[in-house]
Image: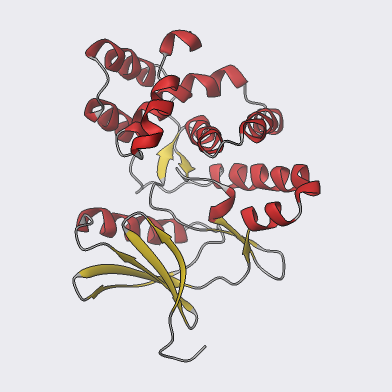
Amino acid sequence: MSAQEERIIAVRTNKTIYRKDEKVIKVFAPDFSKADILNEALNQARVEETDLNTPKLLEIMKRNESWAIVSEFIPGKTLQQIMDEDPEHEDEYLERFVKLQMEVHTKRCPMLNRLTEKMHRKISESSFDATTRYELHTRIDGMEAHKKVCHGDFNPSNIIITPDDKAYVIDWAHVTQGNASADVARTYLLFWLEGKIDLAEKYINLFCDLSDTAKQYVQKWIPIVAASQSVKGKPEEREFLKHWVDVVDYE
């Protein structure tokens, strides 16, 4: 690849991701919140201070009217690509996925935003009625306040497996410190949103088994996480997420 050549890796809502030489350039839409972009870069820099395999932050820059984050390029395939290409070994890949998430949860990064504060803020911003919001706020306050690194968008597309079989975790835009079961609830909902219901159930059962976590405990986080996600979720996802915000089902 020439020094000037750029290749689009992915196009997502409000952002386009390019590869240029050994760099990845994530370019945000001109109207994307500058504060959110700088916070994402700061999150990535803070996670680098742990010993997790993650791309290094190289630069923050302006391209025309858009801000961009430049990171180290990690060669390989996403775990999602590998799972799609080799469905017969899905269980093995899922176990590696769960163990990698558990490894993330062993890390500490004291300068990260707190998960519970983020959840409280998002629920306050949600469109749910006052009674539901009160129940959700109360539930958060009743949860154990851990300080584990929680990725916030942990899914197979955010894991790159290199040619020498090292796993790198990417996209730390939503990382916080808090209770790992909230992170698990988020991943569970992500599988559901993709229509992978069987995989979602297999995932949560495997995580709870390997981590010796009560499934009921993770389930208590599901309405909280769903309500939080509904604030900025895609319109087509909001009704689905509202389905999960029924606290009575998890009492």
Does residue 63 appear in the picture of this structure? yes
Task: Point out the residue furthest to the front here.
Answer: 236
Residue at x 23% of width, y 68% of height: 66
Task: Point out the residue furthest to the right here.
Answer: 88
Percent of width and height locating residue 136 = 34, 18
Left or right: residue 218 versus residue 43 is: right
Residue at x 69% of width, y 57% of height: 82
Percent of width and height locating residue 53 = 57, 61
Percent of width and height locating residue 101 = 59, 44
Left or right: residue 173 versus residue 79 is: left
Left or right: residue 209 versus residue 239 is: right
The image shows residue 100, relative to residue 243, as above or below, that is: below
Q: Quadrant of residue 57?
A: bottom left
Left or right: residue 28 versus residue 54 is: left
Q: Quadrant of residue 134?
A: top left
Identify which residue, 2 or 51, lies in the foreground: 2
Identify which residue, 59 or 108, lies in the foreground: 59
Q: Quadrant of residue 208?
A: top right
Residue at x 49% of width, y 12% of height: 250
The image shows residue 1, relative to residue 236, as above or below, that is: below
Percent of width and height locating residue 124 = 23, 26
Does residue 115 appear in the picture of this structure? no
The image shows residue 125, relative to residue 246, as above or below, that is: below
Q: How is the image coloured?
A: secondary structure
Identify which residue, 114 or 65, lies in the foreground: 65
- Number of numbered labels in the structure image: 0
